[in-house]
């Protein structure tokens, strides 16, 4: 695991994005120039020795400062999630086999039980094979809520939200800069969110190329991977509801576009989507290249504004968040809302201030998960409140205070 996430054995790993690594780099960045100042005039009488040592100390001081800046930037955007990746060994492709629900429950039984007793969720490594897309098995992360480890809820299927990052980005972006685990733990504990399973797949499958999460003509079938393949992997390995009314997508920046576009293309799999600073049309720049092989029809059907104006399919709910200073996403959000036609429902949050950065997206996570809690209506998902098994009433604020509860805990 990365960024000092709880590992499968309950320990911690010091990674390239870990707090221990960052702390050591800060200490080095301070210690080296201080040492340089202290010994500057104490290097002996030989001129060649003084010059050599001073030059060495100056180089080391500069190097530690550059290292610190690089680590800070990497912690923010997670360009590299492990030492292996930093030295050229990709960790996106996973050699792990797909798993069954029984194997997950057995493999992580102790960890999940302990997390439930302490009232917090668990993040575990995951693998999503390219069943239909033909992509290799790729790395993912999965957040399991505390309730997942409750023995009384072994028969309960949980709602799922699939989380998509921007470009560049990785699954670790959600548990690192965006602090997903702590946010969801607090929201669920306070009754402001249903206990979601959160799946964070690898989205940038051929980075540095930006595929915009679409099925590239003559290229990687990323749409299929992020929809059909993720869906199949989660249902095979986790106690997740198979119903579309229990599935949602959420993403930031490019991931916001991906979330809305994929939900519109697959309303049979998803009932809702959240876009945080996303745009409403596929990007066009050198990193994207040709996505649709010149097909105007494919371009239209991967343009959410066009789809919204021509919507005639099943119910779908979308929440789009954008800030006025963030030009293109803000303008696209206005266009998307104006174009919508029933049964498509688009809600917007338009902010007067805020930049295109993780600070805004992290601040909007509680609103987004609370909104999703009222859009998804999985038939078996519930929460335990004061020893009672409860079904949240959709559409009412405050999951804890508006729920149908049985008199005894479901077993």
Image (cartoon, helix red, strand yellow):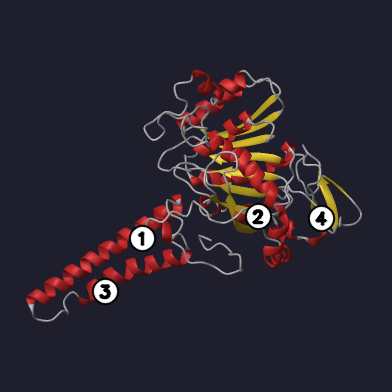
Question: Which callout, 4 or 2, points to the residue nearer the camera?
Answer: 2
Residue depicted at 22% across the width and 65% down the height:
59
Image disc number at residue 35: 3
Q: Residues within 10 Å of mark 1 (few under 14, many from 20)?
A: many
Which residue is the site of mark 4?
Answer: 385
| Residue 115 image offset from top left, x and y in percent | 69, 64
Check the image and report above or below for 261 versus 173.
Answer: above
Q: Tag count in the figure? A: 4
Determine the residue located farthest toward the right in the rendered image: 407
Q: Of helix, strand and loop, which one carries label 3?
A: helix
Q: Of helix, strand and loop, which one carries label 2?
A: loop
**Residue 367 seen in this snapshot:** no
46 left or right of 181 in image: left
Alpha carbon distance from label 4 to label 2: 31 Å
Q: Earlier in the sequence, mark 2 or mark 3?
A: 3
Check the image and report above or below for 26 versus 209.
Answer: below
Q: Residues within 10 Å of mark 3 (few under 14, many from 20)?
A: few
| Residue 392 image offset from top left, x and y in percent | 80, 44
Alpha carbon distance from label 1 to label 3: 17 Å
Question: Which callout, 1 or 2, points to the residue nearer the camera?
Answer: 2
Which residue is the site of mark 2?
Answer: 99
Check the image and report above or below for 47 versus 328.
Answer: below
Residue nearer the viewer, 135 or 325: 135
Which residue is the site of mark 1?
Answer: 68
Tell me whether circle 1 and circle 4 mark residues in contact (CB < 8 Å): no
Q: Of helix, strand and loop, which one carries label 4?
A: strand
Q: Earlier in the sequence, mark 1 or mark 4?
A: 1
């Amino acid at each position: 695991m990365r960024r000092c996430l709880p590992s499968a054995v309950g320990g911690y790993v010091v990674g390239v994005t870990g707090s221990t690594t960052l702390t050591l780099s800060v200490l080095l960045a301070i210690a080296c120039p201080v040492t340089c100042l202290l010994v500057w005039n104490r290097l002996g009488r030989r001129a060649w020795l003084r010059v050599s040592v001073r030059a060495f100390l100056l180089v080391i001081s500069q190097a530690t400062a550059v290292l610190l800046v690089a680590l800070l930037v990497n912690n923010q955007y997670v360009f590299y999630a492990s030492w292996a990746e930093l030295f050229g060994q990709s960790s996106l492709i996973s050699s792990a086999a797909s798993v069954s629900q029984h194997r997950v429950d057995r493999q992580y039984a102790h960890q999940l039980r302990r997390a439930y007793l302490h009232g917090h969720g668990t993040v575990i490594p995951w693998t999503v094979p390219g069943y239909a897309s033909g992509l290799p098995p790729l790395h993912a992360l999965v957040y399991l809520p505390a309730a997942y480890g409750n023995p009384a809820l072994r028969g309960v299927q949980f709602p799922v939200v699939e989380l998509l990052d921007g470009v560049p980005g990785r699954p670790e972006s959600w548990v690192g800069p965006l602090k997903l685990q702590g946010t969801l733990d607090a929201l669920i504990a306070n009754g402001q969110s249903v206990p979601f399973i959160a799946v964070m797949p690898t989205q940038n499958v051929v980075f540095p190329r930006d595929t915009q999460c679409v099925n590239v003509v003559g290229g990687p079938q990323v749409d299929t991977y992020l929809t059909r393949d993720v869906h199949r992997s989660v249902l095979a390995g986790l106690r997740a509801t198979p119903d579309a009314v229990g599935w949602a997508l959420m993403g930031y920046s490019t991931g916001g576009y991906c979330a809305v576009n994929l939900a519109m293309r697959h309303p049979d799999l998803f009932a809702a989507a959240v876009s945080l600073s996303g745009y409403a049309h596929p990007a066009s720049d050198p990193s994207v290249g040709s996505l649709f092989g010149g097909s105007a029809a494919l371009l239209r059907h991967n343009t959410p504004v066009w789809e919204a104006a021509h919507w005639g399919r099943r119910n779908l709910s979308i929440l789009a968040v954008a800030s006025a200073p963030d030009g293109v996403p803000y303008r696209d959000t206005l266009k998307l809302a104006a174009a919508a036609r029933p049964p498509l429902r688009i809600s917007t949050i338009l902010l007067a201030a805020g930049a295109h950065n993780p600070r805004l997206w992290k601040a909007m996570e509680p609103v987004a998960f609370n909104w999703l809690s009222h859009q998804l209506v999985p038939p078996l998902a519930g929460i335990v409140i004061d020893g009672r098994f409860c079904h949240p009433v959709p559409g009412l604020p405050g999951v804890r205070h508006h729920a149908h509860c049985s008199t005894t805990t479901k077993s």
